Image (cartoon, rainbow, N blue to C red):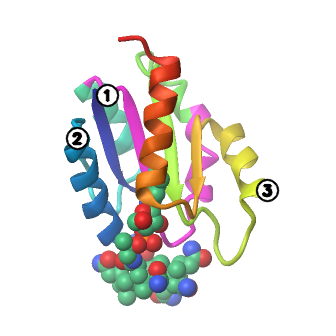
Amino acid sequence: MKIVTGVIGNDIHVVANRLMDLSLNARGYEVFNLGVNTYLEEFFDASVETGADVLLISSLNGEAEGWARDVKPLMSRYNSLDNLVMMIGGNLTVGSGSATDIIPRYQKYGFDLVCHQVDLNTGLDMLEDYLKEHKTS
Ligand code: B12
């Protein structure tokens, strides 16, 4: 299973991204880590080039929503991303905010799995459950 990952936008928090890389590799995924400061176009281009099954985006500074709003319009310009599983996690808002408000907003933007302030391993377990349920190959 191939995963493209990275930290979105002007976000330079790198520690979680390194941990993500290690954990995903340990769980047997083929990881394409684009690192920090990655923009949506770069995520989508890399997903096409690698034939990724999953795109897993992190945001730590809380500014992801500005980019997340462009997910659907931008994705529609690519014709091979229909089956890409979209996941986002970290701090998904600036300041405080409740997951009950945040999760439906990000789902509306086009994310299948949304983890606001969920620890990495819990989130990766959620991904595995989702893949078991939705992907047969
Ligand atoms: C270190 C740090 C910095 C360093 C970063 C150095 C570097 N190169 O990484 C420096 C000093 C540069 C920095 C800068 C800034 N920071 Co800072 N930073 C931190 C700090 C103290 C620790 C972050 C860290 O490394 N944690 C360790 C990792 C392992 O934990 P984590 O990042 O939380 O990641 C975990 C989870 O979020 C989760 N996770 C992450 N991604 C994903 C994805 C999925 C799918 C899942 C399931 C889980 C998941 O998994 C990780 C492990 O469980 C936090 C505060 C804190 N105590 O967390 C603030 C913090 C993240 N920073 C913050 C802010 C605001 C900034 C600045 C905007 C400050 C400023 N005014 O300049 C800038 C932003 C710069 C930028 N362009 O991004 C805020 C964000 C607030 C928000 N979201 O509302 C925080 C929370 C501090 C605060 N309480 O206000 N920062």
Q: Nearer the viewer, residue 31 or 24?
A: 24
Q: Nearer the viewer, residue 77 or 33?
A: 33
Mark 3, residue position: 101
* Residue at the (67%, 40%) spot, across then down: 107
Q: What's the amino acid at mark 1?
A: Ala
Q: Could you tell which of marks 2 and 1 lies nearer the N-terminus?
A: 2
Mark 2, residue position: 31
In the rendered structure, does residue 76 fall within the stretch colored magenta? no
Where 66 falls versus 51 (above or below)?
below
The range drawn in magenta is 51-73
* Residue at the (72%, 56%) spot, across then down: 102
Mark 1, residue position: 52
Q: Which quadrant holds the C terminus? A: top left
| Snapshot quadrant of residue 111 | top right
* Residue at the (46%, 37%) spot, across then down: 127
Label 3 vs label 1: CA separation?
29 Å
